[in-house]
Image (spheres, grey):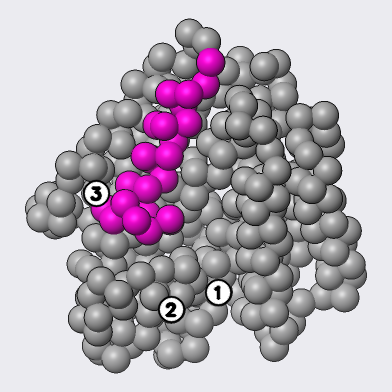
Amino acid sequence: MLSRAASSLFWMARYLERAESIARLLDVSLTAALMETNSDREQQLIAPLTISGTTDTFYELYEDMTAQNLIDFLLLNDQHGGSVFSCIRSARDNAHHVRGNITADVWESINSSWLDMKAIRQRGVSESSVSRFFDWVKERSHLFRGASYGTLLRNDAFRFLRLGTFIERADNTARILDAHYHLSTSLENTESARDLFEWTALLHALGAYEAYQSIYADRMSSENVAELLILNPDVPRSLRACLHETAELLAHIEGDAGRAAKRLATSLSANLRYGDRQYIADRGLHEYLTDFLARINQIADQIQNDYMGVA
């Protein structure tokens, strides 16, 4: 298919997945900040900015780090390209470019989300109403994926769309897990009750709490959470699940292009498939996730280069 269409489908899905991930990440930070002292609360609030590399951009637009300013910046600000508002706008623009490659259901799910998002931005989102907004973002993301999976022809257009979802999801899961682990080991308060609360909030935000309970029961620990979100193939947001899907999708794209991207994805998928928690512990979780992020971004760049003519 045309490289421009492939790029638009890839980024349409990435932007929508990113919007959901931003909402999930901010949900974790706001929930965790409730339990902190004033000094640690600011570290929790600034975590989403650190993860996304937007701390400087935030302080160019806002003087103080407050929950409301963070909500406005990450959810509604049209000057910040990484806000939920901007992500949904970009997804809609990309969908418009490939209107002929997607079904009416997929287009309507994206277009209606954009219309609703503009209305929400006019009303504003407060601290007291932000949880409803998080639910709305997740609902719209689920609707998009359901429409895509349920109505699209299984061709290369479908595969590029799904690739965007899994590349973005893997990147965000790794970033959220790494940042939360760093915070849990650096904050002054290391009480087990706080750790339990924060890891539970993280699992809820990533939609993996029930999976954790099913596998580990009540034995809450950072090691178990890391194993679940990195190595478990049955957890949709785990790194292993995302890389398995990425490698499979690339393998089924027609033509001889993409050998480098397929090789990189297959290698990282095998690394996760045959890894174990002891290997991660010996290497260090932060170092492991830093390496993973470098490799997943290399795969994304290679997909762009091989199929879309953009490095």
Residue lying furthest top: 256
Mark seen at residue 201: 2
Q: Secondary structure at mark 3?
A: helix
Q: Is residue 185 above or below residue 50?
A: below
Quarter of the rendering containing residue 78: bottom right
- Number of numbered discs overlaid on the protein picture: 3
> Cβ–Cβ below 8 Å for labels 1 and 2?
yes
Between the residue at mark 1 and the residue at mark 3, the CA separation in whole angstroms equals 25 Å
Type of the residue with mark 2: Ala
Image position, residue 211 (x, y; %) = 35, 70
Q: Is residue 181 visible?
A: yes
Q: Are marks 3 and 2 in contact (CB under 8 Å)?
A: no
Instruction: Identify the element where label 1 is drawn.
Output: helix
CB-based contact (under 8 Å), mark 1 and mark 3: no
Q: Position of residue 270 (x, y in %)?
A: 24, 35
Q: What kind of residue is marked 3?
A: Glu
Instruction: Identify the residue position indicated by label 3 in the image.
Output: 287
SS at mark 2 in the image:
helix
First to last magenta residue range: 230-254
Q: Which mark is residue 27?
A: 1
